[in-house]
Image (cartoon, grey):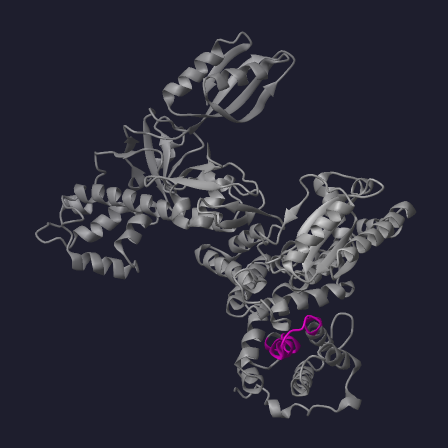
């Protein structure tokens, strides 16, 4: 311990009952399930925390210690263990007070110290902006979650109390915190099955972000028509009577949808409040799984069910472990009534999610339990974060995985897989295994051959068709929705770009060494290792990639390596290198290391030259490009390149088209370009008057011949006065 650190024995002793503040009494009351010795630990934690935070206040003016104690109370209401409650009381001490992790470990044990450290934000580190800091803080929290799930429980309780006391913040802070809560923390609570906390976070976030909309919807719920409220009483009495007649022990609970869920339904389905009919519903809680299906038969005999609105989440649980039967009934006044049927165990897990593991021990360790599902989800996130380039990219991937709805799909062997809403066959492929995704070429859905971009629906049987020669395409990122697929595709594309860069760099260095009458194979190993060590390259591949990307000039590298070749003179050939006469041939598919200049838009068939640009690799220009004259001033950066026999892909081109300015002219030109099997990227008017319009068409073609065909078709149009390549 450094001299600046406080000794824990300097903190005041635990107070007796008469001296305890009311907020500590409320915590102990909520933690009534703990033995007395453990409740004394809570007092000790409060005593240490209060002394550590002494002099610190919240924006509301209250002593700061009231916040962490309130966080512990939220967790006590969920039935959490004493270590979690102690960590909650002390969760801001490492960040905001002189207390260290070592101090906490000495007094309260290593588990408490680990939990506190996991929750601690990274505000003390320097980031480019608040957004990056929040993303990095989230990444750290996830890694701590992987070690102990209780970290996220403390974080959620911390966010819940902050939302309850949001009024003291500025308007800007309220909006930022509310948006973050709705985008990240409420979906995490839902993903972990903690519906009670999720519902309150959503309601508080909605109220802070859209106070007027929240107030209007809340008032409409309270002032529902008398007829509808009376019908609900009638339905409740009828269902209770029918269930009792069947000798089913049950609890029947009426429920009202929250303002947030009603607002989201209105927003997504473009409905008015009056059109959102199923605002009210019922929950039937019974003793066993067979009783659930028995109760389902009872309610379906009492009221007719709506077709296609029945969901069996008992046989196929949600990804967060949630289990229940959902059905929608025709009510006596034509209003649909939602009914959920579940067991007591399922009800506890539905409300508390992973928190139920600590307060309710029956069946909490099975493969479908909320606890084990949460662990597998977090394990997949940890795998994902290892592959992402930045914290912001990782956070975006996590947001994608927090979709509230899932689709449930079957593998060819009959196993069930859950994926986010709107997932495609390619998302399914990556969910099976990264290698399956990387090699995917098509899919069979319910026995029918479909492309990889096909969206999937619950209940479908999916089989992925692979090929060894297949590799990920950049276009795949446009239609995958799962975080794992997005991360895997980006990682593989980076790997392919690196391989392309290594190959191109190898060819460029070989050309430069040929001029010096040597080669890479004839370069002594010691000299090569010395050069790599001098410039801190871990491997030869890293140097070759750097050459391709323009960060090292091949001529300079060749000179350095050739100087030490035995028997070579240090004459003119080495000191004044000339450019190699052989061209490097390109296919256009070199990823990340070859780009095509926007100033002249070169196409296969054009005479071209390359200009070596730091960080960009080789930028290809047409030889007749006006900018080439400027590049002549740096001949060492010229790269002699040409087109390979096999050229693949589509290339950008631009046409200047002059037409009669009359209705339908643009449509005729667009149709002619489409008939020539060319895509139009963009159209803009360059000049326009009453008689003539001059337009620029940005299109995609395969080569010069294809472009010539497009121009011929356009020239044939009667409305076209002239066509010119730009």
Q: Nearer the viewer, residue 508 or 266?
A: 266
- Look at the image and tell me whether residue 257 can be seen: no
The percent coordinates of residue 267 (x first, y second) are 73, 42
Q: Nearer the viewer, residue 470 or 103?
A: 470
Q: Nearer the viewer, residue 345 or 545?
A: 345
In the displayed structure, 6 sits above or below 223; it is: below
Q: Is residue 396 left or right of residue 277?
A: left
Q: Is residue 474 left or right of residue 671?
A: left
Of all residues, the one furthest to the top in this rendering is: 718
Is residue 289 shown in magenta?
Answer: no
Question: Quarter-wise, where is residue 328 in the image?
Answer: top right
The percent coordinates of residue 682 (x first, y second) are 54, 27
Q: Main secondary structure of the magenta part?
A: helix
Q: Residue at x 53, y 64 (%)?
A: 366
Of all residues, the one furthest to the left in this rendering is: 567
Q: Which residues are magenta?
A: 74-94
Q: Is residue 275 left or right of residue 703?
A: right
Question: Quarter-wise, where is residue 346 in the image?
Answer: bottom right
- Look at the image and tell me whether residue 5 can be seen: yes
Q: Is residue 148 left or right of residue 206?
A: left
The percent coordinates of residue 283 (x first, y second) are 74, 56
Q: Residue at x 60, y 66 (%)?
A: 152
In the displayed structure, 90 sits above or below 622; it is: below
In the displayed structure, 16 sits above or below 615; it is: below
Is residue 76 shown in magenta?
Answer: yes
* Total marks in image: 0
The percent coordinates of residue 639 (x first, y second) are 29, 37
């Amino acid at each position: 311990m450094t001299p600046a650190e406080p000794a824990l024995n300097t903190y005041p002793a635990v107070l007796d009952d008469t001296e305890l503040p009311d907020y500590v009494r409320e915590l102990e009351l909520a933690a009534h399930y703990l033995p007395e010795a453990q409740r004394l630990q809570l007092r000790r934690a409060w005593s240490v925390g209060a002394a550590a935070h002494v002099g610190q206040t919240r924006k509301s003016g209250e002593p700061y210690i009231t916040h962490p104690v309130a966080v512990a109370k939220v967790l006590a209401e969920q039935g959490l263990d004493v270590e979690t409650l102690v960590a909650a009381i002390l969760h801001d001490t490492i960040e905001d007070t002189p207390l260290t992790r070592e101090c906490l470990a000495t007094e309260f044990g290593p588990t408490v110290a680990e939990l506190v450290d996991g929750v601690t934000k990274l505000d003390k580190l320097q980031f480019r902006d608040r957004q990056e800091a929040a993303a990095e803080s989230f990444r750290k929290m996830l890694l701590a979650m992987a070690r102990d799930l209780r970290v996220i429980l403390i974080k959620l309780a911390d966010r819940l109390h902050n939302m309850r006391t949001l009024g003291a913040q500025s308007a800007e802070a309220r909006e930022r915190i509310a948006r973050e809560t709705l985008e990240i923390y409420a979906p995490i609570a839902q993903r972990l099955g903690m519906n009670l906390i999720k519902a309150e976070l959503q309601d508080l976030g909605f109220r802070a972000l859209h106070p007027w909309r929240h107030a209007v919807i809340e008032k409409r719920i309270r002032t529902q028509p008398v007829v509808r409220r009376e019908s609900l009483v009638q339905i409740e009495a009828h269902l209770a009577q029918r269930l009792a007649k069947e000798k089913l022990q049950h609890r029947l609970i009426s429920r009202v949808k929250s303002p947030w869920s009603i607002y989201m339904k209105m927003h997504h389905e473009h409905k008015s409040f009056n059109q959102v009919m199923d605002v009210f519903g019922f929950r039937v809680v019974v003793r066993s799984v067979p009783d659930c299906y028995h109760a389902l038969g009872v309610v379906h005999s009492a009221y007719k069910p709506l077709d296609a609105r029945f969901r069996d989440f008992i046989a196929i649980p949600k990804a967060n472990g949630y289990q229940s039967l959902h059905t929608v009934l025709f009510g006596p006044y034509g209003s649909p009534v939602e009914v959920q049927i579940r067991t007591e165990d399922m009800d506890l897990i539905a409300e508390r999610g992973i928190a139920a593991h600590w307060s309710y021990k029956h069946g909490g360790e099975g493969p479908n339990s909320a606890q084990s599902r949460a662990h597998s989800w977090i394990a997949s996130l940890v795998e994902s974060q290892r592959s992402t380039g930045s914290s912001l990219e990782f956070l975006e991937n996590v947001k994608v995985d927090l979709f509230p709805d899932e689709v449930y799909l079957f593998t060819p062997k009959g196993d069930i897989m859950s994926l986010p809403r709107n997932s495609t066959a390619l998302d399914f492929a990556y969910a099976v295994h990264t290698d399956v995704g990387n090699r995917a070429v098509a899919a069979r859905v319910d026995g029918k051959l479909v492309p990889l971009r096909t969206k999937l629906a619950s209940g479908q049987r999916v089989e992925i068709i692979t090929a060894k020669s297949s590799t990920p395409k950049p276009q795949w990122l446009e239609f995958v929705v799962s975080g794992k697929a997005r991360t895997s595709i980006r990682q593989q594309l980076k790997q392919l770009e690196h391989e392309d860069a290594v190959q191109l760099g190898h060819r460029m260095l070989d050309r430069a060494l040929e001029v010096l009458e040597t080669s890479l194979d004839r370069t002594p190993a010691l000299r090569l290792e010395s050069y790599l060590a001098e410039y801190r390259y871990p491997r030869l591949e890293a140097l070759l990639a750097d050459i391709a990307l323009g960060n090292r000039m091949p001529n300079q590298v060749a000179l350095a390596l050739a100087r030490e070749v035995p028997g070579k003179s240090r004459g003119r050939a080495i000191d004044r290198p000339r450019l190699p006469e052989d061209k490097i041939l390109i296919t256009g598919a070199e990823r990340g290391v070859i780009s095509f200049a926007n100033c002249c838009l070169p196409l296969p068939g054009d005479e071209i030259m390359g200009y070596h640009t730091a960080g960009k690799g080789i930028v290809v220009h047409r030889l007749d490009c006006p900018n080439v004259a400027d590049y002549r001033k740096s001949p060492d950066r010229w790269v002699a390149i040409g087109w390979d026999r096999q050229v693949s892909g589509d290339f950008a081109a631009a046409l200047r088209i002059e037409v009669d300015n009359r209705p339908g002219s643009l449509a005729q030109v667009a149709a002619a370009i489409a008939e020539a099997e060319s895509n139009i990227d963009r159209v803009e008017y360059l000049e326009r008057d009453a008689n003539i319009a001059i337009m620029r068409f940005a299109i995609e073609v395969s080569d010069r011949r294809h472009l010539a065909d497009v121009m011929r078709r356009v020239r044939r149009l009667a409305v076209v006065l002239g066509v010119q390549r730009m």
